[in-house]
Amino acid sequence: MYRVLYRKWRPEGFRDVIGQPHVTETLKNEIKSGRISHAYLFTGSRGTGKTTCAKILSRAVNCLDPHDGEPCGKCSNCIGIMNGNIMDVVEMDAASNNSVNNIRDVLDEVMFTPGEAKYRVYIIDEVHMLSQGAFNALLKTLEEPPSHIVFILATTEVHKIPATILSRCQRFDFNRITPEAIAQRLEYIAEHEGVELSHEGAMLIAAVADGAMRDALSILDRCIGLSDTIDSAVVREATGLAGRDYLFTLADSIRNEDVPLAINTINKLHMESKSISRLCEELTEHFRTLMLIKTMKKHAGELIIMSAEETERAVKQAEKFSLSMIVRCIDVLQASLERMFRGGNNKIEFETCMIKLCSPGLSDDLSSLTARLEKLETIVRQGITVSPKDSSQSRSDVQPAEEKPDDTNAESKTSVQGSSLPEIRPRQSEDLIEKLVAKAKPLDSWEDILDEMKSKSFTLYHRMRGTSAYYADDYILIDAPDDSAFAFLRSDKTRNVLIRDAIRKVTGRSYKIGPYRKPQEDSPAQKTKLDEFIEQISDSDIKLTVE
Ligand SMILES: Nc1ncnc2c1ncn2[C@@H]1O[C@H](COP(=O)(O)OP(=O)(O)OP(=O)(O)O)[C@@H](O)[C@H]1O
Ligand SMILES: [Mg+2]
Ligand SMILES: [Zn+2]
């Protein structure tokens, strides 16, 4: 009889459990030193080894001849527990036995000493499903547990466990398993199963499995059903990732404003019975991939699910889009998807959505209007009074204007609007930055400033880590390896304030902040990004002059 891989390859000892050394090493040490707790709680995302470790632990505490904290697998206790012949190890699934009575039945036996084994072990899986009464009964036992009892509670939803129970358990958090570790285990298993699995295929399975070893093994099972030789093409077919060229085509049609191509592609897929809402979801995910490639650069690899060739293609496609264009596509697609779920004709909805995306000149471009409105709100909140002349200027700016496809977008237009502000105009700022860069000196205390940021906002620190800084006059210029640090700063004003505070704390004086640009770099694309950031500084400047 065929046994599914994830059952067949359930690790028998801690040594075969991958990706959870903080759990397995600690448990082994406890076994070796005989410091066994009365209650363990295993939590973490699904398919990462909780039930597996509970089973191993139940044998390890009872093994007659444990080696280095591992159950021997050969003694009568190990074998008895494996076969389910020893009644002292009880596995309960709380999902199906969640009434108070079930737990009472179990807890009634707790007082008796074990028959054959050393410890009575109760494995309660999915423990978050227990009823309130059942938790109360369990708590009573946990308050004064008999010495021969071990409870192992396992759950994916730790927030549903009462604090009174939590505080009486030794807790272990199981991590999602890294793609490399999953791929390595898959390759090991494939070898023993006599199937050929390419490394790229293994990595693709690992990416789709999203950290869960069980899911990875189920996908491998599906692949084996298709072929004995498994490469990324087989994985793509088994996981439904195959033949998704149409996503690249649809994205191209948006980039090239090619309405006929978009409509024909949709029609062709519709004729092939492709679900239109699914198509819309897939295209949204595709733009998410482009967004990650654009912002995370080479670090995007682990976050996207694509084979190497596809990734290469996606990188090329991402180059043709500006970030704000991608974000706008995601917004419009998601709004369209929501409307599909509310009912109506999906095909017409999606066609309209694609025509909108292919024709940025259409005047109902809400996302660009919204962006400007937000900008105005921020300015008003900062207490800038807008003179009648300024307000008329702003109004005419808010008029839906013709949009050009290339890099012109809501953000760059708001930056033009920003230039109508009294203090600093972006162009002037750019000249200023150039002058400053020419005389800037490295800021030695930047590491201390980063440390100071860390104590205020770890996310901010995390994003700014790896940057360096220069100073000139009353400016500090930040040199970031890519644009994501600036994108992060732009997305929330308080982050700017945090940085300036950290600078003041360490240096003892207030500085304005700006981007450091290496003197020789002068490509037009970079200028646009710089523009966006300068727009941000202009705002900071206003605040600083108020201070
Ligand atoms: N860390 C791991 N190392 C090796 N194999 C693993 C690991 N985690 C899971 N597996 C594989 O996946 C199968 C299922 O794992 P297990 O039942 O332990 O997951 P779980 O964490 O209890 O998941 P759930 O939350 O869904 O109950 C195991 O039989 C094993 O084949
Ligand atoms: Mg489990
Ligand atoms: Zn044993």
Image: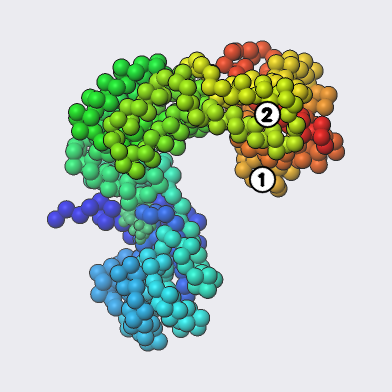
x, y percent for residue 60: 39, 68
In screen coordinates, is 326 left or right of 197?
right
Disc 2 beta carbon < 8 A from ligand 1?
no
Q: Amino acid at mark 1?
A: Ser
Farthest-out residue, left: 1
x, y percent for residue 311: 40, 27
The answer to whether marks 2 and 1 mark residues whose Cβ atoms lie closer than 8 Å is no
Residue 450, compared with residue 82, is above or below; it is above
Q: Which residue is mark 2?
A: 536
Q: Residue at x 75, y 32 (%)?
A: 384
x, y percent for residue 429: 73, 19
Q: Give residue 135's quadrant in the image.
A: bottom left
Determine if residue 246 is in view: yes
Report helix, strand or loop for mark 2: helix
Q: Amino acid at mark 2?
A: Gln
In screen coordinates, is 402 left or right of 467?
left
Q: Residue at x 45, y 81 (%)?
A: 141
Report helix, strand or loop for mark 1: loop
Q: Residue at x 61, y 21 (%)?
A: 397
Determine if residue 233 is in view: no
